[in-house]
Amino acid sequence: MGEFELIEKYFGRAPRRAAVGVGDDCALLDVEPGMRLAVSSDLLVEGRHFLSTVAPERLGHKALAVNLSDLAACGAEPLAFTLAISMPRVDESFLAGFSRGLFALAERHGIELVGGDTTAGPLSICITVFGQVPPEQALLRSGARPGHDLWVSGRLGDARLALEVFRGTATLPGSAFEEVRRSMECPEPRVPLGIALRGLATSAIDLSDGLAGDLGHVMRLSGVGATVDYDAIPRSTVLAMQSAELQRECLLAGGDDYELLFTAPPSRRDAVLAAAAEAQVAVTCIGGIDAEDELRFVDGQGRPMDVAARGFDHFA
Ligand code: ADP
Ligand code: MG
């Protein structure tokens, strides 16, 4: 099977919302009047971002999910995406599973694949998503102010726990492993929450490199510090049964959570909870923003904790 037949069979779909989709030199998209275009890319490389053991269907899901998570963190509504993929050879069972997982998630968010590139090479996948957001309501990393509450969606750490099991540094009974493995391989992008937080959250970021590192990005861009109540960080019962050390690693330096970390004034607590209910996702207040540019951890009693954790850095 050649390049063009492959594209046609697995990735070619008639455009719906796009003015021009797959097949021409460029895709042409309409953005609603008054909206700003939100664009984000993520590159996934085998062995670095995913293991060769992942089912193709889950890989298709995750490749798009991590991109949609960036739109969610901006409060943007997804419109369309492109897919650049390199693979060593044409593996039709891989392509069938991959495209199934990819389009299933795309369909749920009402978005379409409008173009891309396909080449031979080591397996890697780069998706670019396009979304729209009202200019005044885009959620940025830079809006956190002292006194604001710090919130997180869902639960943290399970994806990292699954990775530790794959690495052989942790062991779990079968059903618990399947649960955390699902978190690692099938993250659910918090798009409805991001949209519900428009005009409400003062800053937001999606957690892809661990809470400590990603919160650091918000602190730096907002020029603030933060205090995190370590015991309040939401975690699964599976993770809560692990050693204190492993829990800390998974919760703070984990990565691959794809939950939203955001700030909002304390006066908007009820509105935040209402937004989360509308988006059907749990949110937890895990601390607050401070004026001094430092990241502090306290336990449930408010006692300072000595926690050294950094986010993931590909080149560190
Ligand atoms: P070009 O020569 O202009 O780069 P290509 O021959 O690479 O175009 O691709 C032909 C068409 O197929 C283009 O519209 C491109 O966007 C689309 N395309 C290529 N690969 C993919 C893919 N993996 N998914 C979706 N569309 C693709
Ligand atoms: Mg090309």
Image: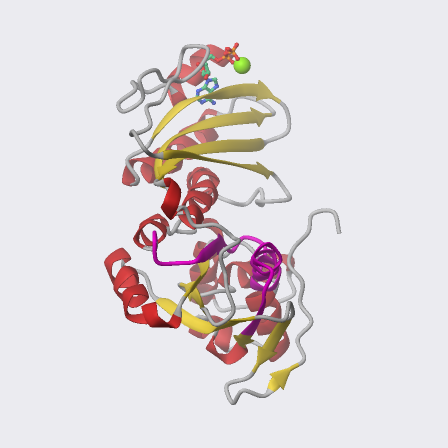
Viewer-nearest residue: 70 or 5: 70
Relative height, residue 108 to residue 127 (above, below): below
Count every numbered label the image shows and give the total: 0
Whether residue 289 sits left or right of residue 72 in the image: it is right
Outermost residue toward the right in this view: 316
Relative height, residue 223 to residue 127 (above, below): below
The answer to whether any part of residue 61 appears in the image is yes
Residue positioned 49% across, 54% down in the render = 205
Residue 130 placement: quadrant:
top left
219 drawn magenta: yes
The magenta-colored residue range is 198-227
Residue 134 x/y as whole percent: 34, 41
Residue positioned 32% across, 37% down in the render = 104
203 drawn magenta: yes
Whether residue 78 sits left or right of residue 231 in the image: it is left
Viewer-nearest residue: 136 or 257: 136
Viewer-nearest residue: 311 or 122: 311
Residue 203 x/y as whole percent: 46, 56
Whether residue 295 sits left or right of residue 112 in the image: it is right
Residue 113 x/y as whole percent: 38, 26
Residue positioned 57% across, 81% down in the render = 298
The answer to whether any part of residue 1 appears in the image is no
Residue 97 x/y as whole percent: 41, 34
Residue 136 placement: quadrant:
top left
